[in-house]
Image (tube, grey):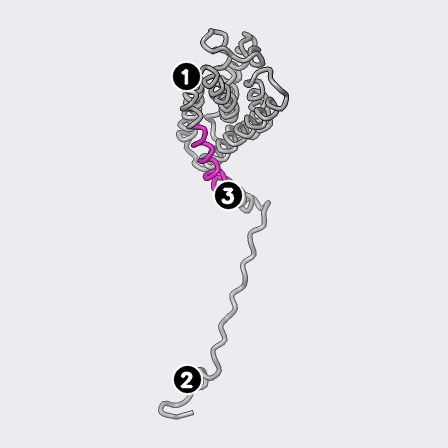
Amino acid sequence: MDTYQELIGVIALTMGVGWASGINLYAAVLVLGIAGATGNVQLPAELVVLQDPLVIFAAGAMYAVEFFVDKVPGVDTGWDALHTFIRIPAGAMLAAGAVGDVTPALEIAAGLMGGTLAGASHLTKDSTRALINTSPEPVTNWIASISEDLMVLGGMWAMFNHPLLFLCLMVLFIALVIWLLPKLLRLLLRLLRKVGQWLGIVEKPATEPKVAEVPDRETTTNALDPPGKQP
């Protein structure tokens, strides 16, 4: 039974750090570091470095920066675009470290799973934020940003305390991403195309000229005949 619980915990940690990294990497690292440093959670040997005060301070400082940047319309999209090259690799590395010092094949598999989940959560967040930025008011940005932070904190709490429940939620998340992400990307591409047309970067689709309908010869002839005259 203990082995089963340990296996569930490792799988939940592997998927959780990847998923959380795609939404808010610094919050995920900060939570892991504080949880490990305070003794509330025993991190795998590969992730013990996150307990270092220097790592905790750096993660906290970057989280504070992202907390404010993430709430400015337009700036948050640029920040997310830049972090495409940071969150996904970091999620893969954290997931690989979550399985501990085992066979290289298992570490690679965990890294691939963590990187995929980080990419899915990051792309979902990035495309959603880009669509939200079409609204000029900043309230929706604040709501979305705070909701994302609470989702990461709540998800990691469930990951540590109720790993089986967290895995069930991850299955629902994956199903939601498979259904929702293509629709979000299509809306985003349509929006970018319209912006490009407005700026003159993208050519507007050519409209076919309307062809005037030619009246039927017999109908025209009959219409011109005097009333009562048979053809």
Residue wearing tag 3:
186
Give the amino acid at mark 1: Asn
Please name whichever residue, 102 or 209, is drawn nearer the observer in this view of the structure: 102
Mark 3: amino acid: Arg
Position of residue 208 relative to residue 61, above or below, is below
Query: Which of the two marks, 2 or 1, is nearer to us in this view?
Result: 1
Task: Name the residue nearer the viewer: 92 or 58.
Answer: 92
Q: Indicate the quadrant containing the C terminus: top left, top right, bottom left or bottom right.
A: bottom left
**Is disc 2 surrounded by few (<14), some (14 to 19) or many (20+) residues within 10 Å?**
few
According to the picture, the residue beneath numbered tag 1 turns out to be: 161
The magenta stretch spans residue 131? no
Secondary element at image label 1 = helix
Magenta-drawn stretch, dominant element (helix, strand or loop): helix
Choose the circle earlier in sequence order: 1 or 3. Answer: 1
Chain-order first, disc 2 or disc 1 = 1
| Tag shown at residue 223 | 2
- Percent x, y for residue 176? 44, 35
Decide: marks 1, 3 in contact (CB < 8 A)?
A: no
- In the image, residue 173 lies at what x, y percent? 45, 31
Q: Which residues are magenta?
A: 169-188
Q: Quadrant of the N terminus?
A: top left
Look at 44% across and 20% down and name the residue there. Answer: 159
How far apart marks 2 and 1 lie (CA) works out to 86 Å
Question: In this rendering, is residue 3 above or below 193?
Answer: above
The type of residue carrying mark 2 is Ala
Relative depth, front residue between 118 and 143: 118
In which image quadrant can residue 145 be found? top left
Label 1 packing within 10 angstroms: few (<14), some (14-19), many (20+):
few
Q: Is residue 215 visible?
A: yes
Residue 6 place in picture, x, y as percent: 48, 16
